[in-house]
Amino acid sequence: MADEKNRIEGAPNHGEGIYNREPDSSRNEEYAAEFTANDYDVRKSVETEDEAITMYGWIGIALSVISFFIWPIVLGAAGIIMGFVSRSKGADTLGNIAIAAGAISILISLFILPFV
């Protein structure tokens, strides 16, 4: 009974006394959700992602256009390869232009330039 007199009014009793038989659910406990690496959602910038995808297409187009002037077979083939990479990443228009320009460059160097 001495414990009951010394207790602060309104303070939770966590089963310290013999006479107190509170259920566990009445205790004041802190509830917090765990935060793990799997719960952390990294938000990527859409602009950065789009720039990375279209970069392959622009490089392919640049290689294909340069192939009209220097090393048509080597740079044209590189432009075609970069065009296919660009198409696989999702930049279909840039990839198709790079493939077409590279193929035209190779065809011109193989079939037209020898007769000029």
Image: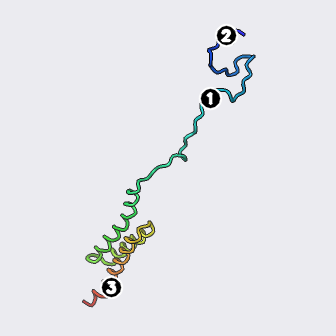
Q: In 3D space, how far apart are the residues under numbered discs 1 and 3 (Cα atoms)?
A: 80 Å
Q: Which mark is residue 5?
A: 2
- Secondary structure beneath disc 3? helix
**Looking at the image, which residue is at 32% across and 88% down?**
111
Give the amino acid type for the residue marked by disc 1 in the picture.
Answer: Glu
Which tag is nearer the camera, tag 1 or tag 2?
Answer: 2
Tell me residue 57's x, y (percent): 37, 68
The answer to whether residue 114 is above or below residue 53 is below
Report if the CB atoms under discs 1 and 2 are less than 8 Å apart: no
Foreground mark, 2 or 3?
2
Question: Residue placed at 38% from the left, 57% from the top?
Answer: 47
In which image quadrant can residue 91 be found? bottom left
Question: Amino acid type of disc 3?
Answer: Leu
Q: Are marks 1 and 3 in contact (CB under 8 Å)?
A: no
Residue for badge 3: 110
The relative height of residue 53 versus residue 15 in the rendered view (above or below) is: below
